[in-house]
Image (cartoon, grey):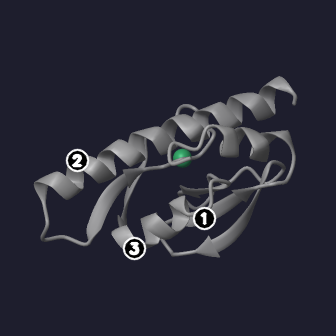
Amino acid sequence: MDSRAERIGTNETLFREINERLEGLNQSFSELTDKIEFVCECGLGTCIERFSMDVADYEKLRGDPTTFAVKPGHEILDVEDVVDEHGHYVVVRKKAGEAAALAVAEDPRS
Ligand SMILES: [Zn+2]
């Protein structure tokens, strides 16, 4: 894997870890909402965007370790494909290869 693809993959898995913790925190503090604020999981490194997502959609996202949620325009099309569009965020899937393997290896739920 080249260093750029590796850096992108590392950023994405880092933000996924943060979102896993956000989901846990939100669930313990509020049983009343079905929407949670998550951070953009893009590989840009400098991004601090946030958006809200249904818990059910987030759970679906985490069901596949190669998918990540990013702001529209934050997808990096040479390493990932857009597989779902929700308006204020899109779901991307890592292209098959070492970056996808990294995403699976770093899956916090595995
Ligand atoms: Zn982003």
Quarter of the figure that contains the N terminus: top right
Given the current orientation, which residue lies at the most extreme front position? 110
Q: Which residue is mark 2?
A: 25
Instruction: Look at label 1 and name its amino acid.
Output: Val
Instruction: Look at label 3 and name its amino acid.
Output: Ala
Mark 1 surroundings: few (<14), some (14-19) or many (≥20) residues within 10 A: many
Image mark for residue 33: none
Image mark for residue 56: 3
Q: In terms of secondary structure, where does tag 2 sit?
A: helix
Mark sitting earlier along the chain (3/2): 2
Q: Position of residue 83 (x, y in %)?
A: 69, 71
Answer whether labels 1 and 2 touch (C-beta < 8 Å). no
- Closer to the eye: label 1 or 2: 2
Instruction: Look at label 2 and name its amino acid.
Output: Leu
Residue at figure coordinates x 79%, y 29% from the top left: 4
Residue at figure coordinates x 48%, y 49% from the top left: 40
Q: Position of residue 90 (x, y in %)?
A: 58, 66
Answer whether labels 3 and 2 touch (C-beta < 8 Å). no
Q: Is residue 76 above or below residue 13?
A: below
Q: Is residue 101 left or right of residue 66?
A: right
Mark 2 surroundings: few (<14), some (14-19) or many (≥20) residues within 10 A: few
The answer to which of 9 and 51 lies nearer the viewer is 9
Q: In terms of secondary structure, where does tag 3 sit?
A: helix
Mark sitting earlier along the chain (1/3): 3
Q: CA distance from mark 1 to mark 2?
A: 23 Å
Q: In terms of secondary structure, where does tag 1 sit?
A: strand
Q: Position of residue 69 (x, y in %)?
A: 54, 58
Q: Is residue 23 above or below residue 101?
A: below
Q: Position of residue 32 (x, y in %)?
A: 12, 71
